[in-house]
Image (cartoon, rainbow, N blue to C red):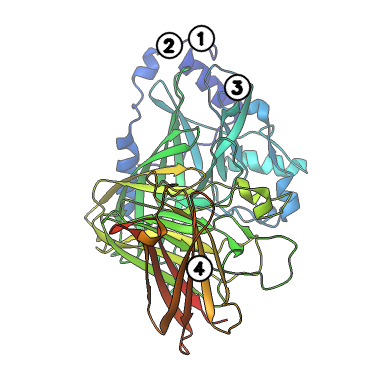
Amino acid sequence: MSFSSPAQTRRTFLARLTTALGALTLAPQSSAAEADKPRFSRDVVLEAAKALAAQPFSPPMQMPDALLQLDYDQYRQIRYNKEAAIWGKTRTKFSIEMFAPGNIFNYGIDISVIENGVAVPIGIEESTFSTPAGEIAELLAELDKVAGFRLHYALNSPSYQDEFLVFQGASYFRAVSRGQNYGLSARGLAIDVAEPTGEEFPIFRAFWVERPSARSENIVVHGLLDSRRVAGAFRFGVFPGDPTRLDVDATLFPRERLTHVGIGALTSMFLFGGLDAADTPDYRNAVHDSSGLAMQNGRGEYLWRPLNNPQNLQVSAFVDQTPAGFGLVQRARELRDFEDLEANYHKRPSAWITPKGDWGAGQVVLVEIPTRSEVNDNIVAYWRPEQALVPGTPLEFSYQLNWPDDSPLPSGLGRITRTAYGLKLFSDQPQLVIDYQGLPTKLIMDDISLEASISQGQILETQIERHGESGLRLFVTFNPEGAAMVEFRVQPRMAGKPLGETMLFRWLER
């Protein structure tokens, strides 16, 4: 079985596409020749992944040095010709644009569109990309490969198709909802994150994009994933909106035993903010794509873990059974929270994973990597199944991935809006401050209690104060007693029930 499309020019592609449709602006009409072509279905991708897994891994073809040696600015000058956008001049509400290989994108992939149930490969010719030099355009046409693609849809205005979803690089993809700017990314699969042996990065070798009907508000993307020890078939049901939603169905075929895989993997950036102040002077109040890890565990408890930019690599594992959801969240939503007029961090999306079915036993893993630059993604979160993947036993899983402004919470359950660290007034005792908002307005303060625990040292004092009509401020004063690292668990309660999210926090000696 072959998984790469034959080389063809853009002219050939358009000719085949026209044949498939009868005419781009007319209703599709199948021909007798098309009737003989294999019909595309998800089984095609499943069989391709299964066949790949039965063979030793073959690395993708590396791109020529002429492309890899392009610096960042030179690579950015390679721009897709919008006149060549797939479905760009049709009644279809979606269109596709391509990314060229080069710079850090060191291998090419194949993309096909599904027209009338038949897969039609997308080809590249010299006019597909605007390039800084003619020889680059010739080389791209000769290679007939792309580095990824982006989907466009009238997300914010009916008169303009916004770019809202990108697949580019390894198994990374990212999306935005209405009114948002790009921020954190998702991954098809993570393997051996933060392991001493090094991380393995799966790639998407090929994509198939189904053409939706003229009235359809959603689109389907299929991806063929491959890596040294596993192959996989992915189906993404894509629903742009407020929020944008992806329904993900995947099947993995291990080549070897895998004990550390990350499902629903999310990658983000946290430089400073909140509990973690800037290490060097900065005019901004905070710099991050995400401010915390939110979770709803299998027992129904809502958890919040503020992010850190630590001095050393930190890995946290939150053991669970049948998780209800988790995600990396950007909770600060005002310009004044950041005071960055260019990056607009307050418009970055959150990402929330809702598992479908029973994911069994495992743990939500949070990896925090030291960084001194906001251009480096240093936060990773994912679900790590307890059970290992073994050859001959496919792993099937499904989840919904939303790109909202915040994580979902029941009405009346307080969300943590701010966390801070300092010393108790007139003392040298360290103190945590936690602000909650979204609580019922009629609260009797005497009925509220605070459950607080510490892994080492001791809690010296807790205090609860009103914070506006629907908020509380909690103070936790503690003594680490010489410990370099302390784990906190703090939860406000009333009448025996949680009043707000449970805050989990790892304090590190400063």
Question: Helix, strand or loop at disc 2?
Answer: loop
For residue 101, say whether it is visible: no
Residue flagged by tag 4: what amino acid is it? Glu
Question: Image quarter for residue 501?
Answer: bottom left
* Amino acid type, residue under disc 1 in the picture: Leu
Amino acid marked by disc 3: Pro
Between discs 4 and 3, the one toward the N terminus: 3
Label 3 – label 2 distance at C-alpha: 29 Å
Q: State the image quarter where residue 148 is shown.
A: top right
Residue hosting label 1: 26
CA distance for labels 1 and 4: 53 Å
Q: Secondary structure at mark 4?
A: strand
Give how far apart the Cα atoms at labels 1 and 3 are.
23 Å
Q: Are marks 2 and 1 in contact (CB under 8 Å)?
A: yes
Using a 10 Å C-alpha cutoff, classify the residue at mark 1 as few (fewer than 14 neighbours), some (14 to 19) or many (20 or more). few
- Whether residue 148 is visible to the viewer of this picture, yes or no, is yes
Q: Which residue is mark 2?
A: 29
Indicate which label's residue lies in the foreground, 2 or 4: 4
**CB atoms of marks 4 and 3 within 8 Å:** no
Circle 3 residue: 158
- In the picture, the disc for residue 368 is 4
Q: Position of residue 18 (x, y in %)?
A: 52, 17
Task: Give me the C-alpha separation between circle 2 and circle 1.
Answer: 9 Å
Residue at the spot 45% in from the left edge and 39% down from the top edge:
207
> Would you say 21 lies left or right of 256 here?
right
Q: Quadrant of the C terminus?
A: bottom right
Q: Nearer the viewer, mark 2 or mark 1?
A: 1
Q: Earlier in the sequence, mark 1 or mark 3?
A: 1
Closer-to-camera residue (435/9): 435
